[in-house]
Amino acid sequence: MTEKQTSDTTPHRILKEAKCSSLSGNSTLLYQIGCDDEKNLYIRIKGNIDGGGFFNKEYVPLQSLLETISDKQVPFTSSVFKKLFIGKSNNTQCFVLAALLAEGLITQVENKYLAGEKRRYGVLECPASRD
């Protein structure tokens, strides 16, 4: 894919629909994980149940998200996803990060320079990739 990695096409199959808290904890998000005919996984934010703010409902290839954060040094913030959401609301990258956190693909990392600052994240190792 090109620099813009989002896809506005709907995967042919929804595998999971779940709720999670936003990163701020001020709202509940509804997200979906789906796949296409080639079994590529996608994720999208479907709704912001009790919060405000704009966001984009496009499906994003999960592989693009994981490749983006696998190259980053820990800790990282939601800004690592900016190139995937060109021209989109900044809420989208934060909301997708919240869904990845809920799915256990990333973890919160405390900032050693700012005590109590928790808006930094690290990638969890996939059990299947361990030796």
Image: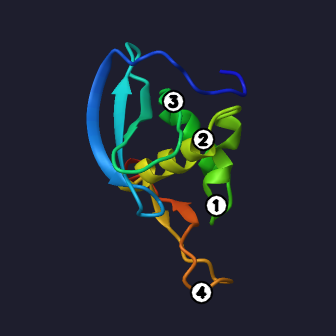
Residue 28 position, x and y percent, is 35, 52
Residue under label 3, please give it.
Answer: 61
Indicate the position of residue 48 as horizontal and vertical percent values. 39, 44
Residue identifier under label 1: 76
The 10 Å Cα crowd at callout 2, few under 14, some 14 to 19, many 20 or more, is few
On-image quarter of the N terminus: top right
Q: Which x, y percent locates residue 17?
A: 27, 36
Quarter of image, res 112: bottom right
Q: Classify 30 as above or below 27.
A: above
Tell me what residue is drawn at x 35 percent, y 33 percent: 33
Residue 88, image x and y in percent?
64, 34
Q: In the displayed structure, would residue 45 be above or below residue 59?
A: below
> Mark 4: which secondary structure?
loop
Residue type indicated by callout 3? Pro
| Camera-nearest residue between 128 and 95 | 95
129 relative to 32, above or below: below
Tell me the element at label 1: loop
Circle 3 SS class: strand
**Nearer the N terminus, badge 4 or badge 2?**
2
Disc 1 marks a residue whose amino acid type is: Phe
Q: Residues within 10 Å of mark 4 (few under 14, many from 20)?
A: few
Give the CA distance from mark 4 to mark 2: 29 Å
Amino acid, disc 4: Ala
Q: Which residue is mark 2?
A: 67
* Mark 1–mark 3 CB contact (< 8 Å): no
Of marks 1 and 4, the one in the foreground: 4
Question: Would residue 6 appear left or right of 51 to someone viewing this image?
Answer: right
Residue type marked 2: Glu
